[in-house]
Image (spheres, rainbow, N blue to C red):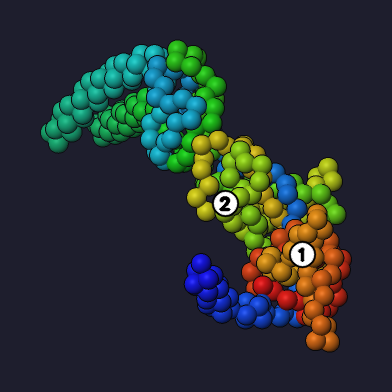
Amino acid sequence: MRSHHFLISGVLGLAVAALPATDVLAAEEVVSPVAVVDSKAVYGRIESRFVVPARSRIGGTLVDLDVTEGSVVEAGRPIARVVDEKLALQLNAADARIRAVSSQLDNARVEFERTTALLARGAATQQRVDQLRTQAEVLTNQMNQAEAERAVILQQATEGSVVAPAAGRVLTVPIRRGSVVLPGEQVATIAAGGLFLRLAIPERHAPLLKVGAMVEVGERGAAELGGATRGTIEKVYPQIEAGRVIADVAVEGLSDTFVGERVLVRVPVATRQVLAVPEAAVMLRAGIDFIRVASGGVERDVAVIIGAVVETPAGPRREILTGLRPGDRVIVP
């Protein structure tokens, strides 16, 4: 039995000897003020760079409509077709006019050539030849006019195709197939030019907003900014509306699934000096936070009030509201 006691005592002694000393596991850090950026949580609205309408160039009946709300279109793609039945009648009238003028012109040219031959034999007058030449020129101009009018009608017929003026997502389609549209009437509105976030921030923060400042953009539908991405303030508008400063934030890869959606962002509005320590330096005992401080070769525990975790050049740290002073030497396990 005594041999067993000696064996257990020897094992415990070896284990205690193998433990590192406490001062090896701890380090001292001198507390000094660091600058942190204060941010304000606001909601930004996803906006498109511009909203452009796709308009009908002629009046008529909408016979084809190839898009609906939410469709993605490319610039120049036909999205609808308007037909004006009067254009076909006008085209037939133009063709008939061209045939009539063409017959008159052929007759005038034959008469002019015959009269010119008679003038060479002295059987006609120069005045008659000049009259026929003028008549042929007038009919030629009438033919050119009729052909131009026919080309106009053909161009109007081709303008019945409504094309997307820019690439983007269709926001609204105010009319439906079979509707009667007027020249210049909107067939669809398209969000184009990319997306950005538009912020409306209280005017007391206006002097603190800077172009180029980074903001944190939260995930859609999240109440917190966990896993946030970053954006850049690219424009601050000089006009204050309803006590709000308007600013635009550029965000890479912003989805256009929902234009007008509200997204939570954090905007830097101020810079302040704080005292911060590593999270490991804070000890919780009996519901009170303590930090071990070295002073004059003696270590003592100081009760502190902690704040939020702040970003510092040394990484994330815990802000200390009260209990520490600049120059204190903190023991960090």
Which percent across, then down, holds residue 271? 78, 66
Indicate the secondary structure of the residue bearing disc 1: strand
Under mark 2, the amino acid is Gly
- Residue 260: name its quadrant: top right
Q: What residue type is disc 1 on?
A: Glu
Which label lies toward us, 1 or 2? 1
Q: Is residue 316 visible?
A: yes
Q: Residue at x 66, y 81 (%)?
A: 23
Residue 213 placement (x, y as % from top left): 67, 63
Label 2 element class: loop
Q: CA distance from mark 1 to mark 2?
A: 22 Å
Determine crowd level at label 2: few under 14, some 14-19, many 20+ residues with C-alpha closer than 10 A. few
Looking at the image, which residue sits at the far bottom? 296
Measuring 84% from the left and 46% from the top, which residue is drawn there? Answer: 243
**Position of residue 175 in the picture relative to residue 218 (left or right):** left
Residue 271, above or below 103: below
Q: Is residue 234 visible?
A: no
Q: Is residue 69 found left or right of 157 in the rendered image? A: right
Report which quarter residue 151 is drawn in.
top left
**Residue placed at 84% from the left, 64% from the top?**
304
Foreground pick, 328 / 64: 328
- Return the residue at label 1: 319
Left/right placement of residue 282 relative to residue 110 reads right
Crowding around mark 1 (Cα neighbors within 10 Å: few <14, some 14 to 19, many 20+) is: many
Q: Position of residue 77 (x, y in %)?
A: 38, 35
Mark 1 or 2, nearer chain start: 2
Q: Residue 257, how many percent across, how many down?
A: 51, 36
According to the picture, the residue beneath numbered tag 2 turns out to be 227
Does residue 242 lie above or below 155 as drawn? Answer: below
